[in-house]
Amino acid sequence: MDYKKVIQINFKKHWREYEGLLLFIAALEIFMMCYGIIHFNFEEMRRRFYFASYVFLLIVTLAAFFVNRLYIKKNEVKYAVINAYIYCIILIFWSAWISGLDIMEGGFPFTYLTILSAVGSLIIFHTGFYGIITVLSTVFMIALCVLEGNTRLYFGFYLNLAIFLAVSILMSYRSYAATRSEYIANYRLEELSEMDALTHIGNRRFMDEYLEKLEKEQTQYTFALLDVDNFKTINDTLGHETGDCCLVQIAELLRDNFGDMVFRYGGDEFAVVSFEMPETVLEKMIQINRSLLKNNEKYRLQVCTGIYRQDGMQDRRTVFSSADQALYVAKQNGKAKGVIFESANDVKEPEIEKLK
């Protein structure tokens, strides 16, 4: 299982909570800056460090918020997650720095513990990576206090901090595992809903969704409709099991020649989406037909096809209708033929290409 997909799915579910965290942190930093201006003695180096840290985190947080909003609007979740990764790493080490300053003054690492809990609950990181970052940032915070020289850390501090880290990592893992299980279950259901059970290629629903996506993106492509010649005769004389084997054989040849974008949209009818030119698609259909004839000596298995080139402007209904017109002309003029659609009023019969 690709954990990146799990993280992306989880982020899509929780990006509003993540942005809420960003806005809360930004508001908190503004409050702390105002508090610092009123109460800090800026002659102390430590107070300067505090104030500079608030300004730094405010700038980074606002930048992360606007970058995240940009990628979410573009539906580029992958880059939104990368942005969140970078921000959360900065945030965790920033909180370790601030808590280090607090510990030096006799305080406690409240900021660090709060930030770790917030980040872990959103599952921004893979659990293993989250664990590494928490350990490294904790070491950084402790080293900061030890190197300062005037701070003593007792056994109770280390024990409580270790327990908190262990619980945080464990809870992160439980949340990640639950999301992963949910993703696997949903993925399998989605796969079953988009796959033809017999041939294991895409079904009509998957084809319609894919064509809709290409239409929105105004992508040029070649669309081909195929129909098996005399399939009813094969089914009636040799049985449905043989007919099913024929359909599986055609699906495998289509996938070998055109990749994953092949579909069974009903009965003995197939469709192909290709980014090659119509002439190339037609030539591949010729090769497919030759393979079908060569591999089946007991019966004559052939296909007719209608081909249409979409230039990025036509909707999917027009594409399907045009390819269907070309397929109709091909079947009217005999078996194992293919027609490339020219125009609505000109599907040229004399230029029909034989697929034999």
Image (cartoon, rainbow, N blue to C red):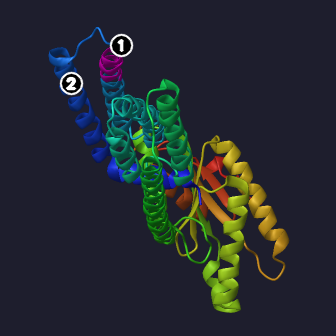
Q: Amino acid at mark 2?
A: Ile
Q: Is residue 211 visible?
A: no
Above or below, 278 against 173 in this view is above
In the rendered image, the residue lying farthest to the left is 38
Q: Earlier in the sequence, mark 2 or mark 1?
A: 2
Q: Which residue extends farthest top?
A: 43
Asked which quadrant contains residue 75, the reply is top left
Helix, strand or loop at mark 1: helix
Q: Which residue is located at x 35 percent, y 22 percent?
A: 53
Pick the front one: 269 or 305: 269
Magenta segment, which residues? 45-56
Query: Label 1 sits on what residue type?
Result: Met
> Label 2: few (<14), some or many (≥20) within 10 Å?
some
Image quarter (top left, top right, bottom left or bottom right) of the N terminus = bottom right
The x, y position of residue 332, in whole percent, is 58, 64
Q: Is residue 69 above or below residue 344?
A: above
Q: Which residue is mark 2?
A: 30
- Depth check, front residue: 247 or 65: 65
Q: Nearer the viewer, mark 2 or mark 1?
A: 1
* For residue 201, side relative to residue 66 (left or right): right
* Residue designated by label 1: 45
Q: Quadrant of the C terminus?
A: bottom right
Count of marks placed on residues? 2
The magenta stretch spans residue 171: no
Magenta highlight on residue 50:
yes
Our reading of the magenta stretch's main secondary structure is: helix
